[in-house]
Every structure is written in C-alpha cells, then in structure tokens.
Image (tube, rainbow, N blue to C red):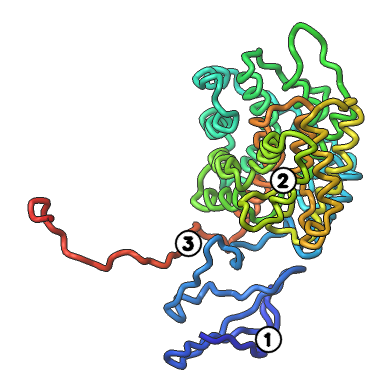
C-alpha cells in the first residue's frame, strides 16, 4: 500500500489543508484521509474511517505511532528535551511554582490567582483525612505486603466509601472526586508505609503544606514532635511536580481506557496504579538502587560502565537515557540540583550507596560513549538517590511516583470524560490463530 499527499479544499476545525491518500498496490484502489494539526508536535492522519472505507486495520504494537486522544494537558518533544504542562516549561514550574499550583494548572488549564490558589489549597487540605474504617482494610493485609499492592486495593476501595462522588456525568461530583483523590493519596501512601513498619498511623494536619504533611505522616511517631526540614519539604514538593504528568504513558493510557467504559474515578486510578507498578514504568527508580547494590563499590564503576557499553553483556545502566527523551531529560537537571541540595542538607558523606551513585554519575557524564549516545542520567536516577537519602525504602519509591502522578491521571480522566469525541476503548488485532474448525467430541480426539 502506497501513501501520497494531496491538497484538499477547505480545512475543517483541527485539520490543515493536506490529506493523505492510501493506495492498495494489489487492487489499485485509493482512499483519502484528512490530516489534523495540533498546536505543536507532529501532524496526525485521521484514520477513524479507515476500516469502514478500506476494510483494513492498522497494526501498531505499543501504539507508538498512534494518537489515541486529543489532549491539551502535556506536551513532550523527546528530540529537543521539552516537557510542557499547559504550555509552561517543567523547569519553570519546578523552580518557581509549587505542587498545589501545578495541580490547579493541570485540572483547570491556567495558573491560579492568589484567591483561587488559597481556595484550592483549602479544598484539598480539608479532604486529606480518610474514612476511619479504612484502617480495618489495611489490617487485612500482611505486614510484609508490597506497598503498591496495598495502594491498588485501598484506592480501588474508595468507591465503597465515597458514593457521593462516583457519578461521572455530574461535573460537581467529578470535581469532588478529583479533589478527594489528590488529597487522600498522601494519607493512603503514608498509611501503607506505617503499616509495613508496624507503627501507628499518623493523621494529617491542616496547618501543613502538602509535601510537609506527607513527610510528617511518614516519619512522625507519637512519642516525640516531628521536626520540619524546609529543604526536604521543598525537595519532596519538586519530586511531586516533576512526576505530575507525562502525556499518554502506560499508566495514563490505562486510566483513560478504564474510564472510557464509564468506570468510577477511584477504580480508574487504581488501574493506573497497577500499571505504574510494572518495573518498565514506575519501578525504574527502584531498579536504580538495585543496580547500585549490584555494583557494590566505587572501584567497580569502570568495570560496570565497560559492561554497559558492550552489546553482548546484557547489562545496562538503569536510570540512564529515556524511551521518549533522545536528548537530556528536562526533569533530570532540576532533580540533579535537588539531589545535591538534599545530600548537603543531610550531611550524607559516608553512605556507600549514595557515594557510589555520585561516582557513577561523574564517570558517565565524562564518558564519550554515553555523551555521544545521549545516555544522560534521567529523573529516575536522581529521585531514587533523594528518596534513599530521606529514609524511604525502595519499596516505597513507586508509591511516591503514584502519589505524584495522581493529579495527572485525574486531569487526563477528567479531560477524557468531557471530550464528546471519546468512545469506549476497543483496540483491534491481527489474528494469527486457527481458522474456523469443527468441534470434535472428547472420545474421538487423538
């Protein structure tokens, strides 16, 4: 099948003046399809009528060349190392904004003024407590259960506690559900952590900001006051900002696909958490720490760097390079700065794993092989080091990713629900199984 481009008459909304013509070389038949423009980024061929017009499906494993939706939330240019939220560069947001402001931006399309921000922060703060009976749900899990397993179960169960915000056709209920999910996720995550330690749950406090409140719920104990460290709170807030949304990745697509059936928002976010749990997605920063443990000591760094450069070794440096970013991950520069601020604040000088990470970073950034292939440390490399320095176990790394990404999932879900062109997700397939055959009774089977 061949493809040609022609000029059409009047462009429609969202479409430019070009069309693409597909020609079946076997029959000589041709079909023309419109080309759509986004505000920035690649043009898109509108193939919604492809099967109806031609009898063909497209074949695109992983959907890497398929646009599944229109979205005004997040834009990535992997070749140039660009990440924008509603048009704002991630570097600017991480440097000048805070997580609550970014949440408002993703949900509402614009940065809030002072009054809007104060009201939004109030609304989120006063939803941070969870139903008291959820404590009994936690106690049904083993103490050594992975916190992500707990998160999937507890977040999915929220729909059993908050019936008044599950009607997806009611804009007010959608807003309430969105606020509840963003507000309660730190509480749920901290409870999962405390449960794994056998420590009592710590209730949220309304006089603390979002990141500080979360750190207190994780690390405070009833027998002494919790000391707020503004450097750690700021670092936590930046981590949340840098992970807030990342376009149509696996977990976001999962949330949208689940939501396309009309499922309630709590179930959709639980589905996103389950997808994020995969080591190829949200488990990357945990894999970084596991890799560092495998390397073991700074004197072995050159050996492992050499192995990573060999195609036959099967070893690769976790936390270097990115599937989307073919240039430097724009989040990594901010995270690197934050990483060094945290290590300096905590006075971390004799932590072998962190010393090893800094040495690996230095060697890789000076190695011509990694520089030429643009295999720079990514956001997962630095976030793992920061969280380790703060005292989080590796099992909590993906939980924190889920906490931060909740606002992105919620904003994407909300956008999908409000998009009149969206339909229930139903991918097609290339069937390669047996053709129709006759049923044979069990006694006659060989």
- Few, some or many residues within 10 Å of mark 3 (<14, 14–19, 20+): few
Comparing labels 3 and 1, the label whose residue is closer to the camera:
3
**Residue shown at 55%/40% (left/top)?**
274
Task: Work out whether residue 70 or residue 299 is closer to the camera in this orientation and state it.
Answer: 299
* Residue 163 seen in render: no
Q: Which mark is residue 427?
A: 3
| Position of residue 101 measured from the top left corner of the image (x, y, whole percent) | 82, 42
Q: Which residue is mark 1?
A: 10
Left or right: 115 as drawn, with respect to 318: right
**Residue shown at 50%/76% (left/top)?**
50
Task: Work out whether residue 260 or residue 220 is closer to the camera in this orientation and state it.
Answer: 220
Q: Which residue is mark 2?
A: 304
Q: Which mark is residue 51?
A: none
Residue 95: image quadrant is top right
**Residue shown at 65%/45% (left/top)?**
410
Q: Earlier in the sequence, mark 2 or mark 1?
A: 1
Q: Residue furthest top?
A: 223
Left or right: 408 as drawn, with respect to 212: left
Please, is residue 157 above or below residue 274 in the view?
A: above
* Residue 55 seen in render: yes
| Position of residue 429 measured from the top left corner of the image (x, y, whole percent) | 43, 65
Please, is residue 435 above or below residue 381 in the view?
A: below
| Position of residue 204 measured from the top left corner of the image (x, y, whole percent) | 73, 21
How far apart, in angstroms, are the residues tagged by discs 3 and 1? 31 Å
How far apart, in angstroms, are the residues tagged by discs 2 and 1? 59 Å
- Few, some or many residues within 10 Å of mark 1 (<14, 14–19, 20+): few
| Position of residue 424 measured from the top left corner of the image (x, y, whole percent) | 49, 57
Please, is residue 113 above or below residue 369 in the view?
A: above
């Amino acid at each position: 099948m061949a493809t040609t481009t022609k000029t059409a008459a009047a462009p429609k909304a969202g479409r430019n003046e070009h069309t693409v013509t597909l020609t079946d070389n076997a029959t000589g038949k041709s079909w023309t399809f419109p080309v759509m423009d986004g505000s920035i980024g690649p043009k898109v061929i509108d193939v919604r009528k492809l099967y109806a017009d031609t009898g063909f499906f497209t074949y695109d494993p992983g959907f890497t060349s398929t646009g599944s939706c229109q979205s005004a939330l997040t834009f990535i240019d992997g070749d140039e190392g660009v990440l924008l939220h509603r048009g704002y560069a991630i570097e600017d947001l991480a440097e000048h904004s805070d997580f609550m402001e970014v949440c408002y931006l993703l949900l509402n399309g614009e940065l809030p003024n002072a009054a809007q921000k104060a009201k939004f922060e109030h609304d989120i703060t006063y939803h941070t407590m969870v139903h008291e009976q959820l404590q009994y749900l936690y106690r049904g899990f083993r103490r050594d259960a992975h916190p992500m397993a707990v998160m999937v179960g507890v977040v999915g169960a929220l729909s059993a506690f908050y019936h008044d915000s599950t009607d997806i056709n009611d804009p007010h209920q959608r807003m309430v559900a969105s606020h509840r999910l963003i507000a309660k996720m730190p509480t749920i995550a901290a409870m999962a952590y405390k449960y794994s330690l056998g420590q009592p749950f710590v209730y949220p406090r309304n006089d603390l900001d979002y990141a500080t409140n979360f750190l207190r719920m994780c690390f405070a104990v009833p027998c002494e006051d919790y000391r707020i460290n503004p450097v750690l709170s700021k670092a936590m807030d930046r981590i949340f900002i840098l992970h807030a949304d990342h376009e149509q990745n696996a977990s976001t697509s999962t949330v949208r696909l689940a939501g396309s059936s009309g499922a309630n928002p709590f179930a959709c976010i639980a589905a996103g958490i389950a997808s994020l749990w995969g080591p190829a997605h949200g488990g990357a920063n945990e894999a970084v720490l596991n890799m560092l443990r495998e390397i073991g000591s700074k004197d072995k760094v050159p050996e492992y760097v050499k192995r990573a450069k060999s195609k036959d070794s099967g070893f690769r440096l976790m936390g270097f390079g990115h599937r989307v970013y073919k240039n430097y991950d724009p989040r990594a520069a901010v995270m690197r700065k934050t990483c060094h601020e945290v290590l300096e604040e905590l006075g971390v000088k004799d932590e072998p794993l962190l010393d090893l990470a800094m040495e690996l970073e230095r060697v890789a950034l000076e190695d011509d092989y990694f520089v030429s292939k643009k295999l720079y440390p990514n956001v997962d490399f630095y976030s793992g080091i920061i969280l380790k320095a703060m005292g989080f176990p590796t099992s909590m790394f993906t939980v924190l990713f889920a906490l931060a990404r909740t606002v992105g999932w919620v904003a994407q879900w909300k956008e999908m629900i409000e998009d009149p062109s969206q339909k229930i997700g139903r991918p097609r397939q290339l069937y390669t199984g047996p053709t129709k055959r006759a049923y044979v009774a069990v006694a006659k089977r060989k």
